[in-house]
Image (tube, helix red, strand yellow):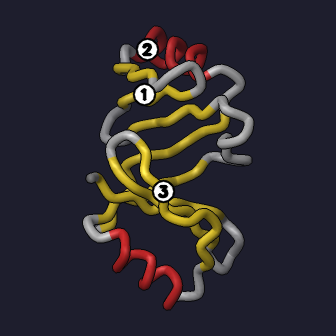
Amino acid sequence: MYEVDFVEFPAESAAASGRFFERAFGWAVTPYGPDYADVAASGVTFGFQADPAERPRAPLVTIRTDDLSAARTAVEAAGGVVTVEPFSFPGGRRFHFREPGGSELALWCPE
């Protein structure tokens, strides 16, 4: 199973981004420290990353899978290149990859 369910955005302030979406649309916000917040939208969660060392350059579309190892094999077999090795975060593990057209995406698996 592969399903887009998360998009991570660069943010100057994760808290400000979270407050905006909560006030504007009534979406639930889950802060993960001072530099990160999740906003639960309709079927997709938005993440806002304010840590300069972790902040993506552009919105990062994240694909959910049940098997991170098999997903990596599929990405590499199709010509994708892993740009960030698998790492753990609250709720799961993920890695980033660049597809042959140049866009960076991520794959994640809940733990």
State which quadrant residue 94 falls in.
Answer: bottom left
Q: Are marks 1 and 2 in contact (CB under 8 Å)?
A: yes
**What kind of element bears circle 1?**
strand
Left or right: residue 99 compared with residue 58: left
Q: Is residue 50 above or below residue 94?
A: above
| Residue placed under numbered mark 1 in the picture | 39
Q: Is the N terminus in the top left, top right, bottom left or bottom right quadrant?
A: bottom left
Q: Is residue 14 above or below residue 63?
A: above
Point 63% across, 63% down: residue: 104
Left or right: residue 95 compared with residue 100: left
* Among numbered discs 3 and 1, the one appearing first in the sequence: 1
Q: Amino acid at mark 1?
A: Val
Which numbered disc covers residue 22? 2
- Alpha carbon distance from label 1 to label 2: 8 Å
Task: Sort mark 2 into few (<14), some (14-19) or many (20+) by Cα contacts within 10 Å.
Answer: some
Question: Between residues 108 and 16, which one lies in front from this camera angle?
Answer: 108
Which numbered disc covers residue 87? 3
Q: Amino acid at mark 2?
A: Glu
Q: Are marks 2 and 3 in contact (CB under 8 Å)?
A: no
Q: Whole-percent x and y of residue 31?
A: 44, 21
Point 31% across, 64% down: residue: 65
Q: Nearer the viewer, mark 3 or mark 1?
A: 3
Task: Sort mark 1 into few (<14), some (14-19) or many (20+) by Cα contacts within 10 Å.
Answer: many
